[in-house]
Image (cartoon, rainbow, N blue to C red):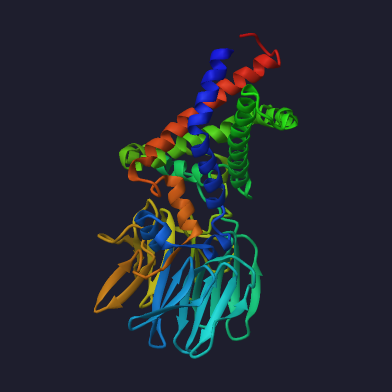
């Protein structure tokens, strides 16, 4: 038992701070739809270049209107004219559309749909307080997705909103790549619908923070006691009960999932071939892959047909009731340019819809592009250079979590912490079981 205690103490002291950081940042990153993560910013003079550069990933799309360039980002909407850049809407924005007939801009934001006319500020138009993750428009009708699960139609002339229930999509389950499965599990969307996967991730992350923090405090109190220094002894007993209890035993599965998937993601370039070539059969996939009713990543409306994109592909409907699959492969974003529908894939090919309604692969296009603009030649954008004097808390948390905040080699520190977490669980649960006399050691 003494050897187990020494191993447990060594693992906790050497990896506890890293585990606490991973738990805290992971919990917050799982809730990236919280607007305050982008509103809180830190001056760039206090941050490493690796973090500052990653802020560019908050880019969503951009377009030309009123003689200016409007850029949608996780930080809000920026306007650029000549060399002057300023923010015009300080709310995380996921898409911007322009109605050239009415000369009106529309923005899908984390707090509803906003509109803007020339020489007028942005103003809320519809779905106030809703997280509008995707938006498409045809004529005077906006087709919008809220929280990746509910569809809405908005009349832009009257701002009247029609709510549509979650789409009931019938499809055949299929094998998925281990790469897709690993990401879904780590990001809290790979087990169950209705937020249960995310809840399991949250509980594991928060409990990891609790274990790391309580372990350090207990160590400090015991060390002071051994040195004969004054301590608040009455804290030790409740802290011990908090730190060593059967709840940890029930968290072995979410802990192990986060541990293993985290290592795979840290070394994605090394494992890429294996992860993509290995398939997870539909027969053993978790329940979430049988419904995906909270998995609307992209949408499109051409005036006749509605389309939604999820992890499996693109599904179309004429009445928002009956849905039919029209293209396979993760539809990360759908966007229209010159009345043509382009699809940006995530771990799947980029596509374009052709005249007969089918989809053809778009060769030599950037993976997960977010926007298309044409200035003599067609160009696909994943980001757009903007000058920021500060960086959002979200990006800081992201680089702290993957280790790039510190150095490129920090992934090995994260790996070490993952290994120590496994050792902590084994030694801690064994000591707890012996103490409760479940077995002798």
The quarter of the image holding the N terminus is top right
Please give the name of the residue rendered at 57% of the width and 82% of the height, measured from the top-left corner: 156
Where 435 sits versus 231, above or below? Answer: above
Residues 325 and 208: in front is 208
Please give the name of the residue rendered at 43% of the width and 54% of the height, measured from the top-left corner: 330
Where 7 sits versus 90, above or below? Answer: above
**Residue 51 rendering spot, x and y as whole percentages:** 39, 55
Q: In the image as oriented, which residue stretches furthest toward the top?
A: 440
The quarter of the image holding the C terminus is top right
Count the marks. Answer: 0
**Residue 133 rendering spot, x and y as whole percentages:** 53, 64
**Residue 50 rendering spot, x and y as whole percentages:** 36, 54
Residue 435 visible, this orientation: yes
Where 97 sits versus 186, above or below? Answer: below
Residues 258 and 217: in front is 217
Residues 304 and 271: in front is 271
Residue 179 vs residue 24: left or right? left
Residues 119 and 330: in front is 119
Residue 144 found in image quarter: bottom right
Please give the name of the residue rendered at 52% of the width and 48% of the height, measured from the top-left corner: 25
Please give the name of the residue rendered at 40% of the width and 68% of the height, measured from the top-left corner: 388
Residue 311 visible, this orientation: no
**Residue 93 rendering spot, x and y as whole percentages:** 50, 69
């Amino acid at each position: 038992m003494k050897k187990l205690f020494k191993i447990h103490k060594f693992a906790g002291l050497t990896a506890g701070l890293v585990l606490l950081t991973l738990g805290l940042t992971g919990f917050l990153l799982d809730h990236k739809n919280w607007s305050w993560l982008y509103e809180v910013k830190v001056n760039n003079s206090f941050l490493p270049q690796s973090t500052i550069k990653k802020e560019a990933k908050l880019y969503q799309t951009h377009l030309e209107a009123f003689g200016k360039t409007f850029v949608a980002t996780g930080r809000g909407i920026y306007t650029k004219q000549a060399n002057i850049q300023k923010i015009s809407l300080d709310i995380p924005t996921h898409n911007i559309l322009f109605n050239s007939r009415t000369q009106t801009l529309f923005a899908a934001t984390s707090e509803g749909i906003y509109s803007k006319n020339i020489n007028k500020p942005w103003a809320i138009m519809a779905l106030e307080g809703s997280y509008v993750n995707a938006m498409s428009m045809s004529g005077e009708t906006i087709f919008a997705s809220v929280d990746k699960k509910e569809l809405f139609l908005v009349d832009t002339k009257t701002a009247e909103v029609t709510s549509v229930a979650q789409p009931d999509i019938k499809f055949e389950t299929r094998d998925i790549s281990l790469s897709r499965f690993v990401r879904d599990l780590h990001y809290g969307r790979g087990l169950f619908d209705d937020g249960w996967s995310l809840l399991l991730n949250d509980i594991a992350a928060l409990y990891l923070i609790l274990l790391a923090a309580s372990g350090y405090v207990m160590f400090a109190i015991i060390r002071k006691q051994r040195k004969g220094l004054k301590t608040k002894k009455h804290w030790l007993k409740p802290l011990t009960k908090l730190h060593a209890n059967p709840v940890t035993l029930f968290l072995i599965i979410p802990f192990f999932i986060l541990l293993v998937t985290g290592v795979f993601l840290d070394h994605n370039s090394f494992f890429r071939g294996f992860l993509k070539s290995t398939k997870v059969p539909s027969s053993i996939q978790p329940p979430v892959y049988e419904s995906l009713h909270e998995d609307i990543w992209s949408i499109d409306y051409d005036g006749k047909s509605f389309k939604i994109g999820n992890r499996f592909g693109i599904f179309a409907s004429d009445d928002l009731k009956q849905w039919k699959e029209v293209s396979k492969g993760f539809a990360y974003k759908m966007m229209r340019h010159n009345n043509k529908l382009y699809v940006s894939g995530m771990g799947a090919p980029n596509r374009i819809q052709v005249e007969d309604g089918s989809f053809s692969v778009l060769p030599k296009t950037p993976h997960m592009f977010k926007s298309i603009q044409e200035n003599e030649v067609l160009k696909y954008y994943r980001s757009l250079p903007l000058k920021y004097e500060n960086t959002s808390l979200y990006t800081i948390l992201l680089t702290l979590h993957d280790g790039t905040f510190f150095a490129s080699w920090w992934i090995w520190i994260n790996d070490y912490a993952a290994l120590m977490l496994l050792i902590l669980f084994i030694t801690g649960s064994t000591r707890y079981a012996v103490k409760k006399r479940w077995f002798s050691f």
